[in-house]
Amino acid sequence: MKPLHIDHATLELPRLPAAFEGLRVLHLSDLHLTHWIPRMEKTRQALGELRPDLAVITGDLGHRSWRWRQSLSAVLRLLESIQAPMGIYFILGNHDSLQLGAELARHGMRMLTNESVVLTRRGQRMALIGLAQHRRIDTDIPAALAETRAEDFKLMLMHYPDLIFAAGAAGADVCLAGHTHGGQICYPDGSPIMGHDALSPQQCSGVHKINETWLVVNRGMGKAGVKLRLFCPPHAIVLTFTRGGRSAARSPVSENAAAGRISAAARR
């Protein structure tokens, strides 16, 4: 396993409650772990040094669903170093087994399956929403939002980034996703050779603004299909939430230009 690349990004969020100013969120995705290897120890140590407020994982913690017991041991060992006082939350991806999710939940992490939890600080609320994405047909955004309020700030976890349009239409302020592996096989400048969903290859990694919703796509740590990552190192993202920006709609041209600048900066 190559050294973990850690990106830091700040999101300006006009609807962020004042109590959550400066919130630091560790975003992981696509671990694809089936067994522990000594080289992963450096990754475990690096995660332990980050000290986020909240940690979230957007699917594919394991890889071979029938090897979920081995995956469980490796995932727990990797994540045990993370100190996040607001907790570790996760959703399942298309490579995960339901048994793995249930066992991780028994060990203190919270699995979200078309549901939400309300995080509170000094009497103010943030809704953390997790979509069921073990398969695409499992996704039920209305059910996931059933316990939220219209005025809640909404942080949504989803495995497939191309659900951003449905999530944005449902009122999500920030969407965190994975699945694409950032292309996994990239050109030397980090540009993906191909995408893995309905979004453009340029949107399969990094930070993007889609209308009024931020989309953060994590290129993950593991591999699937071809057993190779080329010019696409293992990835973790630390996001800092700050109040700012504007809530008025922008034109599609300026929106796309802004997304391009942000994405390029995030890759550096």
Image: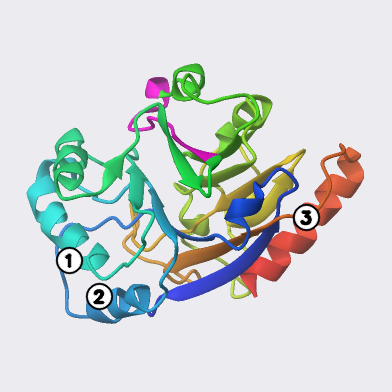
* Residue occupying the point 82% across, 48% down: 256
Q: Does 171 appear in magenta? A: no
The colour scheme applied to this rendered structure is rainbow
Residue 1 seen from this side: no
Tell me the tag on residue 77.
1
Is 28 above or below relative to 168? below
Closer to viewer: mark 3 or mark 1: 3
Is 141 above or below relative to 201? above
Does dot 1 land on a helix, a strand or a loop?
helix
Nearest the eye: 240 or 44: 240
Nearest the eye: 56 or 133: 56
Is 86 above or below relative to 135? below
Place of residue 72 in the rendered image (x, y in percent of width and height, measured from the top left): 14, 53
Q: Name the kind of residue labelled 1 in the image.
A: Arg
* Residue occupying the point 55% across, 60% down: 23
Q: Does 137 appear in magenta? A: yes
Nearest the eye: 246 or 35: 246
Place of residue 121 in the rendered image (x, y in percent of width and height, measured from the top left): 51, 49
The segment highlighted magenta reads 126-138
**Label 1 to label 2, Cα distance in Å?**
10 Å
Q: Is residue 170 left or right of residue 210?
A: left
Closer to viewer: mark 1 or mark 2: 1
Q: Name the kind of residue labelled 3 in the image.
A: Gly
Q: Are marks 1 and 2 in contact (CB under 8 Å)?
A: yes
Q: For mark 3, what is the residue?
A: 244
Place of residue 26 in the rendered image (x, y in percent of width and height, measured from the top left): 45, 61
* Residue occupying the point 45% across, 24% down: 144
Q: Residues within 10 Å of mark 3 (few under 14, many from 20)?
A: few
Q: Residues within 10 Å of mark 2 (few under 14, many from 20)?
A: some
Q: Residue furthest left?
A: 69
Q: Quadrant of the N terminus?
A: bottom left
Tell me the tag on residue 40.
2
